[in-house]
Amino acid sequence: MKLSHSKRRHGFTLVELLVVIAIIAILIGLLVPAVQQVREAANRSSCQNNMKQLVLAIHTYHDNKKVIPPGCTTDATLWGTGSGWGSSWMVHILPYVDQISLYNVWQFTGNSGYVNANNRALTTQTNTSALMIPLYRCPSTTLPKTPQEGTSLQVMQGNYVGIAGAANQALAGTGYTESRIDNSAAGINCCSGGGPSSAGGTLFRGGQITLTNLTDGSSNVLVISEHSDYLVDTNGAKHQWTAGGLYGWSMGTNTNTPPNNPNATSSDNRQFNCTTIRYPVNQKTGWAINAANTSTQTGDCTSGVCYDLGNNIPLNSAHAGGVNGAFGDGSVRFISDGTSLSILALIAVRDDGKPALLPQ
């Protein structure tokens, strides 16, 4: 009897294996962008939810105090007990964003938003760890949690910014001129520059307005938006320039007098955690640096965009195509990169008499 020793071969040939690998690679190439898009959509939605809670907290503050919280204050009455660099709007709304325990031990005196020992101990959990308030951070942000440029302070950098109003450079051609504005002294360094600051919006220095002062209609007035991505200078270097400057989410201002004199110049005109609209949405690149101080690349503060602090840092985000914005009626909408500067400026002003509609 003759036995057959032949065996049937099983498995892939080399060509078949290469084809399978190529197909898998193509599928992964298609899947990864889809996953990223889904993740960003979820982050953008979460960011919108954060802003919704923030603007509703402002409404609750108004219900209790009969006034919209100031964008930033010094430590003096009505909100404190002394002078110095006070606290921002994000401190004032703490009781309405589930942070009343922090608010109750906040010391509104002695540079409360700046170097106050009590408050810095509260906002810094250890020597190397900042207290995180997730509601004040956009999930899509590319920025580190604490300032990394020009400071060693370990304090959370917020990603949301109060809208103080608009600069007349942005309002050009609209038929409206803002008189409630201060200009800075001509200087490229911190504190002698900073760009124009306005009191024509909702969250500004020493503000004491009510919802009834939003005469353009609360749904037409932008109250909060984003500073959540890097800005890039003319040398191509990235900078963490936001409205919190070097000092984070709690920093306020050094005077409670709202901007009110466009013909005067101030030696220190900064409004921390607020911005005055001067540039289009997501204008992130091409910012001048301080030619006299290129080692730290602090920026040219006369542009209103620099590290400590530019009053005119443009609204920006890591979301594709625009930024989120919260309005006076409590709604949150997406403001696209294609929004004209004039429309952006008009929705930043509460009572210009020219209600502007965002493009759909």
Image (tube, helix red, strand yellow):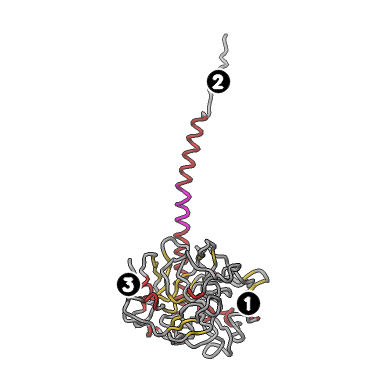
Q: Is residue 84 left or right of residue 360?
A: right
User: Which callout, 3 or 2, points to the residue nearer the camera?
Assistant: 3
In this rendering, the label closer to the viewer, 1 or 2:
1
The one nearer the camera, 284 or 295, is 295
Residue 103 is one of the magenta-drawn residues: no
SS of the residue at dot 2? loop
Mark closest to the chain's N terminus, 1 or 2: 2
- What's the distance in space between the residues labelled 1 and 2, CA to CA? 76 Å
Which amino acid is tagged 2? Lys
Q: Any mark on residue 7, and which? A: 2
Q: Is residue 31 magenta?
A: yes
The residue most toward the front is 292
Looking at this view, name the residue that lies furthest to the top. Answer: 1
Q: Is residue 148 visible?
A: no
Mark 3: give few (<14), some (14-19) or many (20+) Cα within 10 Å. Answer: few
Distance of label 3 from label 2 (alpha carbons)? 77 Å
Q: Picture coordinates of residue 49 (x, y %)?
A: 45, 68
Amino acid at circle 1: Leu
Front residue (pair 294, 104): 294
Dots 1, 2 in contact, CB < 8 A? no
Residue at disc 1, secondary structure: helix
- The dot on residue 357 is 3
Question: Would you say the magenta stretch is mainly helix, strand or loop?
Answer: helix
Q: Secondary structure at mark 3?
A: loop
Residue 122 has which mark?
1
Q: Nearer the viewer, mark 1 or mark 3?
A: 3
Q: Identify the magenta region.
A: 30-39
Mark positioned earlier in the residue sequence (1 or 3): 1
Crowd class of label 2 (few under 14; some 14 to 19; many from 20; radius 10 Å): few
